[in-house]
Image: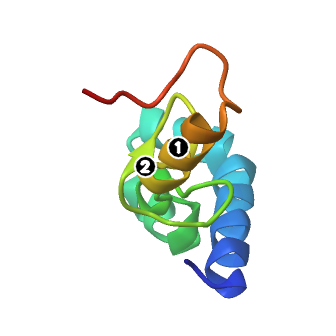
Amino acid sequence: MATTAWKNRYKKRAELVAKYAELRRKLKKEKNYAALAKLPRDSSPTRLARRCEITGRRRGYYRKFRVSRLVLRQLAADGKIPGLKKSSW
C-alpha cells in the first residue's frame, strides 16, 4: 500500500496540471517551447500517473472504477460494485 506521502504528492501534481493546463495549451499552439520548458516540471500531464483511490497503488489500475485490481476484486467479492461479481468455475 502506498504511503500518505505518495497520495499527497499525486494530489499536488494533479492540482498543478489543472492550474497550468490552459497556459500549456496556449504555449503549445504558439509553438513557444522555450516558455513551455520554464513551467514547473510537475505541471506536465505525462508525469501524472493514475493511482487507486483507496490504497494509492499505481499498478494494476482500472480506469472505469478508479481502483487497483486488488481492491476491485475485494469490492466485487463483497458485492459493493453493482453488476459485478467474482467469477468462479
Q: Nearer the viewer, residue 74 or 51?
A: 74
Residue bearing mark 1: 72
Find the distance from the CA under tag 2 to the CA under tag 1. Answer: 5 Å
Check contact, mark 2 vs mark 1: CB within 8 A: yes
Q: Which residue lies most toward the front here?
A: 89
Could you classify mark 2 by the number of other residues whose Cα lies within 10 Å: few (under 14), some (14-19), or many (20 or more)? Answer: some
Binning the other alpha carbons within 10 Å of mark 1 as few (below 14), some (14 to 19) or many (20 upward) gives: many
Q: Amino acid at mark 2?
A: Arg
Q: Residue 1's mark?
A: none
Residue 31 occupies quadrant:
top left
Q: Is residue 43 above or below residue 30?
A: below
- Quadrant location of the C terminus in the rendered image: top left
Q: Position of residue 80 (x, y in %)?
A: 71, 32
Q: Which residue is found at the position 61% from the left and 79% from the top?
A: 6
Answer left or right for 13 relative to 67: right
Q: Which residue is mark 2?
A: 69
Q: Which amino acid does the dot numbered 1 rest on?
A: Leu
